[in-house]
Image: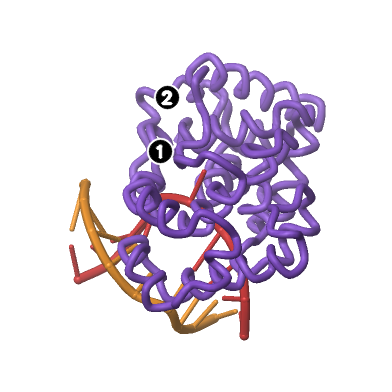
Chain colours: A purple, B orange, C red
Amino acid sequence: MTTWADVADETPLALTRRARKMGRILADEYPEAHCELDFANPLQLTVATVLSAQCTDKRVNMVTPALFARYPTAKDYAEADPTELESYIRSTGFYRAKARNIIGLGQGLVERFGGQVPHTLDELVTLPGVGRKTANVVLGNAFDVPGLTVDTHFGRLVRRFGWTAETDPVKVEFAVAELFPRRDWTALSHRLIWHGRRICHARKPECGICPLARLCPSAAA
DNA sequence: ATCCCGAGGG
DNA sequence: CCCTCTGGAT
């Protein structure tokens, strides 16, 4: 078992080795882990990811077919009536703010990026509703640019694992980036999120059936 | 630090 | 009833 006392004494090299062992176990456990938002192009993924804030992917996928049919292009969002757009996305929560962001997102894309979703993090985060986490989801899943998507699951798990004690998402991202090669970042993000949803729940983690328990200080308690 | 906001689970 | 769900902007 790995205890918190062990983690406190762990060298950077030992931490890297333990983290990568855990990463391999997750890879074996979730070989099929992938983005669970339904989308057919970068614009759809960007909008779906904006909608996914504080909402399950399953619920986002319930509203996006009608939404994407009604608003096929960035220009359609840019010209959308807020009340009508809200009616499509109401059940995802935060619907007024999300509708406002998505209209601004469409306008930003039309005015500054020729109606196309940009391929860099710096450009993506200039768009309303798109923060670092959303930008990394788009890069990793629409453009095959490696990115760590530090959301609530990701942060909770890596702190429980003792990979970092940081709570600031950007610091968490940089800390985990040190532990894994770049090419693994996107898949690792998916696997952490899948594990968080299936076993390492926020409320009642199922350490008894967790394949990582032997290497996780939070399971030793 | 607080707000935005709806739906489902324990 | 409270907590949580792949956050972001003010």
Pick whichever, A125 or B10, lies toward us: A125
User: x and y percent of residue A214 in the render?
Assistant: 52, 21
* Quarter of the rendering occupied by the C terminus of chain A: top left
Task: Give the residue at the far top of this rendering.
Answer: A28
Chain letter for mark 1:
A
- Three-letter amino acid code at the position of disc 1: Arg
Image: A80 above or below A53: below
- Residue at (50% x, 38% y) in the render: A193
Q: Nearer the viewer, residue A220 or A191?
A: A191
Q: Amino acid at mark 2?
A: Cys
In the image, residue A194 above or below residue A209: below
| A48 sits left or right of A13 in the view | left
Is A221 left or right of A191, judged from the image as shown?
left
For disc 1, the neighbor class at 10 Å (few under 14, some 14 to 19, many from 20) is few
Residue occupied by mark 1? A197
Mark 2 lies on residue: A210
Q: How dense is the environment of label 2, judged by Cα within 10 Å: few (below 14), some, or many (20 and up)?
A: some
Which chain's residue wears label 2?
Answer: A
Of the image marks 1 and 2, the number of the one nearer the N terminus: 1
Query: Which image quarter: residue A124?
Result: bottom right
State the image coordinates of residue A82 (x, y, percent, origin top left): 44, 77
Taking depth in this image into account, of A168 and A85 the one nearest to the observer is A85
Residue at image point 41% right, 46% down: A57
Mark 1 element type: helix
Q: CA distance from mark 1 to mark 2?
A: 12 Å
- Residue A80: horizontal and vertical position, in percent? 48, 72
